[in-house]
Image (cartoon, rainbow, N blue to C red):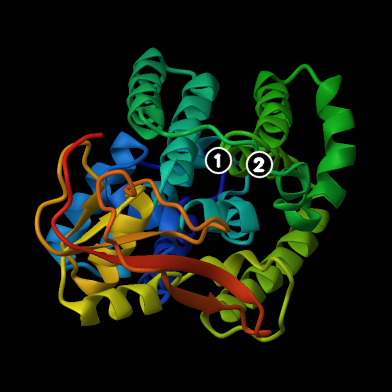
Amino acid sequence: MGVPAGLPSPRPALALLALGLAVRLALAGALAPTPEELATWAGDGSAAAHLAAAVGTTALGTTPLGLRVGGVVAAGLAPALLLAKARDPFRFVFGVLALPAAVWSGLLAGPASWVYAAGCALLGAALAERVWARVGLAGLGAALLVAGTAGAERSAGSWVWALAAGGVLALPATPWAAVAAVSGDRADRTCLGVGSVGVVAGAWIPGLAALGWTALLLGLCRAGGGFARGTWVASGVGLFLCTTLAAHSARPMVALEGDPTARLGIGADLGRGVQAWGLPAYTEDVETAALLRWYGGVDARVVPEGALVGAALYVRPWRGVPSTEIDARCPDRSGANVVSEYNPDGSALQRWQVYETGPCGGTP
C-alpha cells in the first residue's frame, strides 16, 4: 500500500518502534520483579496481566522476561495504531520512546500496560476516518480495557507523578494546547481532550498518564515549525532521563529516600531464607506467598480458614505486635524470626516475621 503524496513513509518509524521494543524486552529481562508483579503472577489483580504472566512464564520459564513479555509487547506496539494520524511518524515514535510514563507503564507486569494499549486503540478509533477502522479499533480497545482492568485494584497515585511523568514535554505541549483549543481540526482537539483527561486521571488509574502524554505528543507531531523543534528538544531530554532511570534501576547510582526502584527484587532474601527451613509455608496475603514461590520455590499459600496440617511456617509482613492471626489455632507456635531487606543507604526497606508451627487446630 502506497503512502499519500506529501506524507513521510511510516517504515522508519516502524523500524524505530521495533528497536524500542527490543530494548524494552532486554530491560524487562534484566530487572528483578516487584512484589506487586509477583502478586499479579499469582492471580491477584488484572485478568489480562495474570493471563499474560502465566503464559509468558510457561513459555519462557519463571523469569522476569516471562513475567513481563505480554504487557511489554502490548504496550510497545500500541503506538503503531496512531501512526496514521501523526504527520511526522518518526518524531512521534521517538517521542513515545522518550516518555518516562510510556516506558515504565509498559515495562512492569500489571494493569498499566493493558490500559495504555487499550487507550491507544480507542484513541485510534476516535481519530479514524473509515467506519471499519473505527469499529475494529474500538472493539480491540474495549476488549483490552475490560481484560486489563478486571480484578485490578484502583489506588490513588500521585499528582506529582502524573504531571511529571511526561518530563519536559509539557513545555512545547502547553502553547500547542492553546492553539488546539481554538482549532477547527477534530483530530487536534481530540488529542487535546484525551491528553488533558489522561494526565489528570493518571493520578488514580495506572496507564492513563502515559496515554495522556502520548495523545498530547501525537497532537504536537501533527504540527510543524517551532512545535516540531520543541518536541525534538523535549524528547531528547526525556530520552536522557529514561536512560538514566534504567541505569539506576539496574545498578543504583545514588541513595534516594523512598526510591521506587528499590522495590525491584524485594523478597529474594526472604525466599531463600524460608527455603532453607525446608517446610511448607502459610502467609496472610497473596503477595507474600508469591514472593516465597518465586524466589524460594516454597509451597506457599494464603492461610486457610480450616486447619493448618503438619509442621509449617507462618510468614507475614512485620507487625509491631506479638500476636498473630493464627494464635487461636496454633498456641504452640515459636517466637518470630525476623527477616529484613535494606535500601542501598542501609535503612530498612521491608521486614517479615517467620513463625514455626506444629499441627494446628481447626477454625476457632
Q: Position of residue 4 (x, y in %)?
A: 49, 38
Q: Residue at x 63, y 72 (%)?
A: 245
The reply to whether dot 2 and dot 1 touch (C-beta < 8 Å) is yes
Secondary structure at badge 1 equals: loop
- The N terminus, quarter of image: top left
**Could you tell me which secondary element the residue under label 2 belongs to?**
loop
Residue 120 versus residue 335 in the image, above or below:
above
Return the residue at label 2.
157
Q: Nearer the viewer, residue 32 or 121?
A: 32
Q: How far is mark 2 from mark 1, CA to CA?
A: 8 Å
Residue occupying image coordinates x 87% and y 40%: 174
- Judged from this view, the residue extending furthest toward the top is 131
Tell me which label, 2 or 1, sits earlier in the chain: 2
Q: Residue at x 73, y 42 (%)?
A: 220
**Closer to the camera in the image, 250 or 343:** 343
- Residue 233 figure quarter: bottom right
Q: Could you tell whether 96 is left or right of 303 in the image?
A: right
Q: Residue furthest left?
A: 310
Instruction: Mark 2: give few (<14), some (14-19) or many (20+) Cα within 10 Å.
Output: some
The residue that appears at 75% across and 41% down in the rendered structure is 223
Task: Please state which amino acid type lies under the numbered disc 2.
Answer: Gly
The residue to which callout 1 is attached is 206
Residue 29 at least partly seen: yes
Query: Of residues 345 and 339, which is closer to you in this image?
Result: 339
Q: Picture coordinates of residue 289 (x, y %)? A: 29, 56
Image vertical order of residue 282 relative to residue 252, above or below: above
Which residue is more in the foreground, 59 or 262? 262
